């Protein structure tokens, strides 16, 4: 139970941190089993064609794993991270 609470907190902290970055156009947090992954997932759309260092730092601070970074609609990238 504690582990789940820690993961939930990390997911929400990550989403909040990403939302403050200028390169991030949108952020969404998905709970366990809501999407295709069993744990907490954070999805973000970046308004640039690559993942900037500030995004990578946010992931590292919350000990999140980047599981996908795919092009989306021209110059945007969609990232998916799990905690």
Image (tube, rainbow, N blue to C red):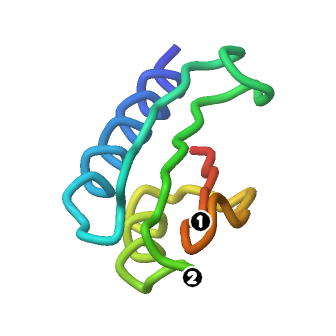
* Above-or-below relation of 31 to 17: above
- Label 1 – label 2 distance at C-alpha: 7 Å
Q: Residue at x 45, y 83 (%)?
A: 52
* Above-or-below relation of 72 to 6: below
**Mark carried by residue 45:** none
Is 56 on the left or on the right of 22, as rendered? Answer: right
> Tags 1 and 2 in contact by the CB under 8 Å rule?
yes
The residue to which callout 1 is attached is: 77
Is 20 on the left or on the right of 28, as rendered? Answer: left
Q: Residue at x 57, y 82 (%)?
A: 50
Q: Secondary structure at mark 1?
A: strand
Seen from the viewer's position, the closer of residues 15 and 49 is 49
Residue 37, how many percent across, how many down?
Answer: 77, 30
Residue 31, how many percent across, how many down?
Answer: 55, 20
Residue 27, how many percent across, how many down?
Answer: 40, 43
The residue to which callout 2 is attached is: 50
Is 38 on the left or on the right of 8, as rendered? Answer: right
Query: Toward which corner of the image does residue 21 lie, by quadrant?
Result: bottom left
- Please identify the residue farthest to the right as the structure is shown: 36
Q: Residue at x 35, y 55 (%)?
A: 25
Q: Residues within 10 Å of mark 1 (few under 14, many from 20)?
A: many
Seen from the viewer's position, the closer of residues 73 and 9 is 73
Residue 51, how many percent across, how many down?
Answer: 53, 78
Seen from the viewer's position, the closer of residues 26 and 3 is 26
Q: Residue at x 35, y 61 (%)?
A: 24
Q: Secondary structure at mark 2?
A: loop
């Amino acid at each position: 139970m504690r582990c789940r609470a820690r993961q939930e907190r990390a997911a929400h902290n990550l989403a909040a941190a990403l939302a403050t970055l200028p390169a991030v156009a949108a952020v969404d947090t998905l709970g366990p089993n809501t999407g295709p992954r069993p744990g907490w997932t954070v999805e973000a759309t970046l308004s640039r064609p690559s993942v900037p260092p500030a995004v990578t730092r946010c992931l590292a601070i919350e000990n999140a794993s980047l599981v996908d970074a795919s092009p989306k609609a021209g110059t945007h990238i969609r990232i998916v991270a799990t905690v």
